[in-house]
Each structure stands twice: as C-alpha cells, then as structure tokens.
Amino acid sequence: MNTITSKDGTPIAFERHGEGTPLILVYGATGHREFISLGAQLGGLLGATHTVYAYDRRGRGGSGDTVPFSVEREIEDLAALIAESGGTANVCGFSSGAVLAMDAAAAGLPITRLALYEPPFVVDDARPAVPGDYLERLDAYLAEGRRGEALELFFTGPCGIPAEFVAGMKAAPIWPELQKVAPTLAYDGRFMADTMTGRPLPRDRWSSISVPTLVMYGGATEPWLVNAARAVSDLLSSASLMELSDQTHDVAAEALAPALTAFLADGERA
C-alpha cells in the first residue's frame, strides 16, 4: 500500500500494479481494496502495458476522511492520484464511481480517456425511482449510529435489492465490514441524488466532457442499468457503447481487460 495526501490534507491509500500508461480505477459505494481485488487482477492482465492504480476513496479502507464532505474533495483526491501517476491518466469508474469519474472529467481533470462501467442512473420506469426522502433518512440513520439500517436502506433503495436478499446479507461475515464504511454512503448519495429519479439525465452537468469515453454494461445485467448506459452514451458526444457478454454489475477482470486494452490502445495510436 502507498499513500498520497489530497489537497485538504486527507491521506489517500492506493496500490499500483504493472508498468506503463497509467489507468486509475474508481470504485463505487462501499468498494475499496479490501473488498475488491479488481486492481490486482487487472494489473496482472494489463500490467505489461499499463500501470493500474486502485485507491480507497476517502472514508474507506486505508484512506482517511475529513469533514465536512463535498464532491469537490473527492475530485481533488482523484486529481492527487493523477498527479502521482505522472500528470495525466486514463480513468475507469464503476457504478457510482463512474459518476464520480464523469464529474471529475467535467471539472477538467487531465483525464486522457474515460471508461465507465454501469453508472447506476435510473432514467425511466424500468425500475422504481429512489424515494425522494432517501438521503434525509440515510443521514438520520447515520447521525443516530444506526449503520446497519443505513446499509439496508441503501441496498433496498438505490441498489434495488429485494429485502429478503438483504436479510440474508446481514448474516454474512462481510456485513460488519460493510458497517465500517456505511457513513460514506451519504457521500455517493449526494452526487447521485438527482440521477435516480426516473427522469432523463441532465444535459448540462457533463456537457464539458470531450475526452473519448467508453460506456460499458453487462449482457446479463439488470435492464435499468443497460438503459442507464445507453442514456450516457447518447448524452456524451465523445462516447461509444459496448456490451460485455454474460457480465453482471459485478464485472470480471477477464471480461473487462480486452475491452480496456482495445479502447486504451486506440488512444495511444492517435
């Protein structure tokens, strides 16, 4: 593990695999290096041509946290990692991490190419919209220290997981570990707040993104996530759309690596 310091003084933990053009992975809500081995796996598959960086977003894993939270601070964390990687980098975001990556690109970070896997927007009636009081209820649970209930609200709300499946998750060994990062659910909830309403995406929020962008979704994923990927592809003039056969929201490195290899190679030939 390595550590860099973000603009506000928060330590951000990361690991690095391989040697070559930098590729930074941005995980979604609850995700960090102790839970997700994607960084090491992609490093093994892409390491001959790319340096893969996987980092713990603030408040997760080995990274610190500083209050109050703002999306700008998360963007500064990614900016610090891009600076550490050499000043420019390719970025690949997953789930809500893909939305953070979009916000970072729109803010003008020196991102060479942007890859997005299943940003979890709710853009139509393919599934119920997240209730309008979700963030208020989440904040209340967290303020009272009711982390388990905050997790249940997250999984049944934004994630759309049936309550009976969430009840089973509570008995799993990972549940206490998830409770440790539960306060960070409010972070993702804030930059996702207006994008899970069942309405079309706002056209102005990401209008400044001009870097080549690959939007990916799994062939075995939920229909609403497919619709979200298509909406992003339609929204960004620089975007292309790709289906990864047989993949779900939990994408395998072996399926992701060939798509990233081809996409990033196009940029290096340009």
Image (cartoon, grey):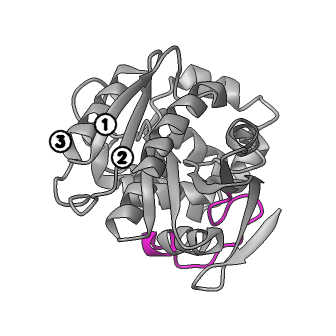
Whether tag 1 and tag 2 are in contact, CB under 8 A, the answer is yes
> Where are the magenta residues, as a range?
55-74
Q: Main secondary structure of the magenta part?
A: loop
- Does the magenta segment cover residue 42? no
Q: Secondary structure at mark 3?
A: loop
Question: What residue is rendered at 54% in x and 67% in y?
Answer: 78
Q: Is residue 231 left or right of residue 82?
A: left
Q: Secondary structure at mark 1?
A: strand
Q: Secondary structure at mark 2?
A: strand
Question: What residue is rendered at 69% in x and 51% in y?
Answer: 32
Query: What amino acid type should be assigned to the residue bearing mark 2?
Result: Thr
Whether tag 3 and tag 1 are in contact, CB under 8 A, the answer is no
Q: Is residue 246 left or right of residue 133?
A: right
145 above or below 151? below
Looking at the picture, tell me which residue is in the foreground, 22 or 188. 22
Question: What residue is rendered at 71% in x and 75% in y?
Answer: 4
Query: What amino acid type should be assigned to the residue bearing mark 3?
Result: Pro
> Which label number is shown at residue 213?
2
| Place of residue 145 in the rendered image (x, y in percent of width and height, measured from the top left) | 65, 60
| Place of residue 79 in the rendered image (x, y in percent of width and height, measured from the top left) | 52, 72
> Which label number is shown at residue 200?
3
| Place of residue 170 in the rendered image (x, y in percent of width and height, measured from the top left) | 71, 32
| Place of residue 191 in the rendered image (x, y in percent of width and height, measured from the top left) | 39, 59
Q: Quadrant of residue 81?
A: bottom right
Question: What residue is rendered at 51% in x and 75% in y?
Answer: 76
Whether tag 2 and tag 3 are in contact, CB under 8 A, the answer is no
Query: What amino acid type should be assigned to the residue bearing mark 1?
Result: Ser
Specify few, some or many for label 1: CA neighbours under 10 Å numbering under 14, 14-19, or 20 or more. some
Specify few, some or many for label 3: CA neighbours under 10 Å numbering under 14, 14-19, or 20 or more. some
Q: Is any atom of residue 225 visible in this view?
A: no
Q: Which residue is mark 1?
A: 240
